[in-house]
Image (cartoon, rainbow, N blue to C red):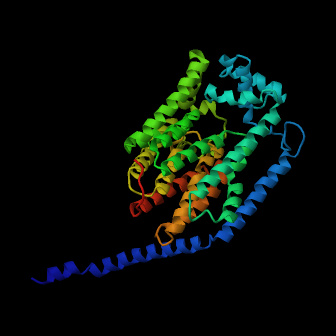
Amino acid sequence: MNSAPENAAAPQPQQSRLSGGAKDLAISRDSLTVRIASRLTPRRVRAHALILALCLWGICAIDYATPGLFDRAGNLKFQDFLQFSISAHLVAQGRSRDLYNSQVLAGAIRQITGTSHIDLKYFYGPQIALPFTLLNNLSFIPQAEIWVALSVAVYFVCVYLITKSCPNVRSSWKVVIPCAIAYPPVFHFFARAQLSAAALLFVTLAYLSFRLGNTLLGGFALGCLAFKPQLLVAIPLILLLARGWSILAGLAVSAAVQLGFAYAYFGHSVMRSYFSVLLYSAARPASTELNLSAIQMHSLYSFWELLIPWPIGVWVAYFLSSIIVIAVAARFWKSSSPLAIRFSVLLVATVLVNPHIYIYYLLALAPLFLLLIDWSIQNADHPNTPALRILLYLAFLIPLFGPLAFWTHLQLSVIVFAVLLWTLQKTAISSRGEGVS
């Protein structure tokens, strides 16, 4: 009668040994994370940043130190600025209807560069061309140099403003400045003369507005990202699910004002051409991108595009993974977690869900590093702090090696961003702070 209970109880020591082994493995993994994170001292990080900055900007200086339009490798300097210079000339000449005419753009590129090997398409709203009309009296290189100088100034002002809002980082300028100079997206937006600094400016203004409790103004700043519609794929959905009505209202008003102005200024035909090009590009990204675009992007879409050979499979995987990211971010945003964590999650989700994001637009992630490092210093004893510091180090550096995906078919930056999002989720569960409705 008593033998059955004794036999039933027999497996318990083995089960205990198994659970003990899993616990030991977890402890070992955690201690490894702590050891790695402990090596990322401010002094080492500063040294790494200085080495990276010297490599990137030294190569840039050597490459661009040639007279004329082309660098030592035979590539056009500030190549992406061509589309803005040409569009500004067309608007100034009253030819706005030709903004989205590929043949007109190709002809203008040949006239400026003397070559037909540069393939660019204009996907921005027509209103983007207006500020550049102020530079119409200058030739291409001086135009690009002025824009790049202004963009670099905007970038460092944004870094300064975010750093000043972080009490645990504001005294660490000896680390912040080298890291700001070495941040790979800075090098890329400089070399390309892209509009990344504008996106960073609006993101920075949004965060500072939220910090002051002005959610409507913060939403208005986020709505200014409508100049690059792909940046607003995730944010409105996150705010809608999180019931962030005041932020969503500000965003909607801002985007509507920008769109309404463009419609009133340029007219129906130009705007119809713009939306036709935009929608065509969204529905058939492969037809409007260069052959190697996927390895240069850092979104969920490009991640699946490198792994899955079937277009329908890419879209399915992209939609499912984007839904998960948006749902996680929405849950974060309506929680009582600190603003630094919630805003960082919003930025990561914006990048991951954006189907078309090159490394130079990762410039908008710059506030994330400052905010999370500040939080990690304040919460040095938090169990997720070591993993968070390692992930921030990788998120800073890994996008630079995106082209390796040509051989691996694996975009490591997307994996790092996804793991960072997961780590922030675990962190947010145990964190409390101010809220933004």
In screen coordinates, is 115 left or right of 176?
A: right
Identify the residue at horizontal 82%, vertical 30% (top origin): 138
Q: Is residue 71 above or below residue 128?
A: below
- Residue 407 seen: no
Residue 380 x, y percent position in the rendering: 51, 71
Identify the residue at horizontal 46%, vertical 40% (top origin): 216
Q: How many marks?
A: 0
Identify the residue at horizontal 67%, vertical 53% (top origin): 400
Residue nearest the viewer, comparing 15 with 153: 153
- Residue 231 seen: yes
Identify the residue at horizontal 54%, vertical 54% (top origin): 417
- Examine the image and state in which quarter residue 115 appears: top right
Residue 13 x, y percent position in the rendering: 30, 82
- Examine the image and state in which quarter residue 46 appears: bottom right
Residue at far left of view: 1
Residue 393 x, y percent position in the rendering: 61, 62
Residue nearest the viewer, comparing 226 with 171: 171
Residue nearest the viewer, comparing 28 with 192: 192
Residue 77 x, y percent position in the rendering: 80, 39
Residue at far right of view: 67
Q: In which quarter of the image is the N terminus?
A: bottom left
